Image (cartoon, rainbow, N blue to C red):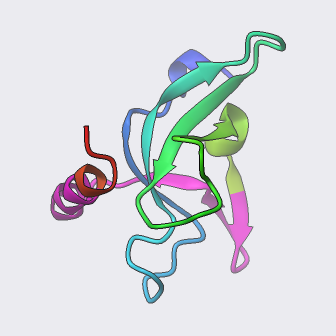
Amino acid sequence: MDILNNIPQNGFYVQYKHDPNGELYNHMYEVVGIGRNTEDKTYTVLYRPLYKNTWMKPADYQSRPFDMFIGTVEKDGKTVPRFSLITDPGLVLVLHKVRSDMYPL
């Protein structure tokens, strides 16, 4: 995979597991960048959830292998992206507020 042409932009993403009828903003995330493992030179995507959880503590960010983050999965018999960039301007505005409330500077 050519990483330079596939780097996910920083922003808000929804994971294929999102349930519109579930907990507010479930499986929605803010991608903050990519990282590289200094030992094996693999790339990872760094992101943080926009919903409350306790399993992540004390980490500030989650990390997923680059190829897995940009990859696809099977859902309901269809191949779908594991994560999709959220582009709806209204939802992006709301998620900026959610992020600021969850992760104050």
Q: Which residues are magenta?
A: 73-98
**Residue 92 spot, x, y in % from top left:** 23, 55
User: Does 96 appear above or below 1?
Assistant: below
In the displayed structure image, the side of residue 52 where residue 76 appears, left or right? right
Extreme residue in the bottom direction: 21
In the displayed structure image, the side of residue 64 where residue 18 appears, left or right? left
**Residue 98 spot, x, y in % from top left:** 27, 60
Quadrant, the N terminus: top right
Q: Quadrant of residue 95?
A: bottom left
Extreme residue in the right direction: 40
x 30%, y 52%: residue: 99
Quadrant, the C terminus: top left
User: Does 86 appear above or below 39?
Assistant: below
User: Does 35 appear above or below 28?
Assistant: above
**Residue 102 spot, x, y in % from top left:** 33, 55
Q: Quadrant of residue 43?
A: top right
- Is 36 colored magenta in this rendering? no
x 46%, y 67%: residue: 52
**Residue 49 spot, x, y in % from top left:** 48, 55
x 62%, y 54%: residue: 56
Q: How many marks?
A: 0
x 59%, y 46%: residue: 58
**Foreground of the two, 99 or 60:** 60
User: Does 21 appear above or below 18?
Assistant: below
- Is 79 colored magenta in this rendering? yes
**Foreground of the two, 20 or 23:** 23
